[in-house]
Image (cartoon, rainbow, N blue to C red):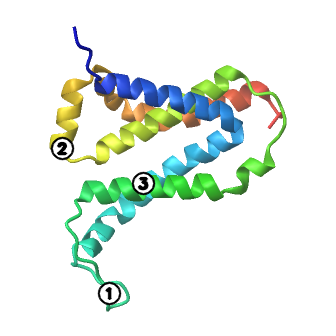
């Protein structure tokens, strides 16, 4: 009997890494990471096609420079998305403003899982349609996760509102 890895196993490992990463960073850096994901989504939606045109040689920068490549729109969108997340998460000073209050482990798990789900869904949605279909045919979990993308987009905001209302003026 051979065991072969599946997309669901990969997603499970990514969620475990996301939660451990969240515990290591604590609340403020997880918020920074979550905000970076939202900024990455916006920047990718606004600049993705323009940068794709630039890398195809269809648009020039400064009226004199362009790059001719065989990059696909999905590749450019995913690289932009991940680069924005990496830059903001690494450079944002929000973690230095840490309030040393004890954060509920459940709260950290919830934010970390929502952050990871949002990241996975956004990368999946930026893949070419045939690749998306191929992955979704092989993963039951990603099908469910992808079908709740709209809810996953607003869930961190709703969680933040619920938790801050529950705690009052602690923040």
Mark with earlier residue (3, 1):
1
| Residue at x 27% of width, y 72% of height | 55
- Residue 42 horizontal side relative to residue 64, left or right: right
Q: Residue furthest top?
A: 1
Horizontal and vertical percent for residue 118?
A: 45, 38
Residue identifier under label 2: 129
Horizontal and vertical percent for residue 36?
A: 54, 51
Compared with 125, 53 (above or below) is below
Q: Residues within 10 Å of mark 2 (few under 14, many from 20)?
A: few
The answer to which quarter of the image holds residue 45 is bottom left
Compared with 43, 171 (above or below) is above
- Mark 3 vs mark 1, CA separation in Å: 23 Å
Horizontal and vertical percent for residue 135?
A: 23, 32
Mark with earlier residue (2, 3):
3
- Mark 2 vs mark 1, CA separation in Å: 31 Å
Residue identifier under label 3: 81
Asked whether the beta carbons under mark 2 and mark 1 sit within 8 Å of each other, the answer is: no
| Residue at x 55% of width, y 34% of height | 156
Q: Quadrant of the N terminus?
A: top left
Q: Residue furthest front?
A: 1
Residue identifier under label 1: 65
Mark with earlier residue (2, 1):
1
Compared with 105, 112 (above or below) is below
The disc label shown at residue 109, or none: none
| Residue at x 19% of width, y 66% of height | 70
């Amino acid at each position: 009997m051979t065991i072969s890895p599946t997309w669901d196993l990969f997603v499970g490992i990514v969620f475990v890494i996301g939660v451990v990463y969240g515990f290591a960073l604590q609340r403020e850096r997880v918020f920074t990471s979550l905000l970076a994901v939202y900024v990455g989504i916006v920047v990718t939606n606004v600049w993705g096609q323009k940068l794709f045109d630039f890398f195809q040689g269809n648009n020039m920068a400064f009226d004199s420079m362009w790059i001719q490549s065989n990059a696909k729109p999905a590749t450019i969108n995913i690289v932009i998305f991940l680069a924005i997340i990496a830059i903001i998460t690494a450079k944002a000073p929000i973690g230095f403003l840490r309030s040393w209050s004890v954060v509920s482990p459940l709260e950290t798990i919830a934010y970390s899982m929502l952050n990871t789900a949002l990241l996975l869904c956004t990368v999946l949605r930026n893949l070419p349609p045939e690749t998306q279909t191929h992955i979704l045919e092989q993963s039951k979990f990603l099908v469910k996760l992808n079908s709740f993308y709209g809810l996953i987009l607003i869930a961190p905001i709703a969680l933040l509102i619920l938790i801050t209302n529950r705690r009052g003026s602690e923040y």
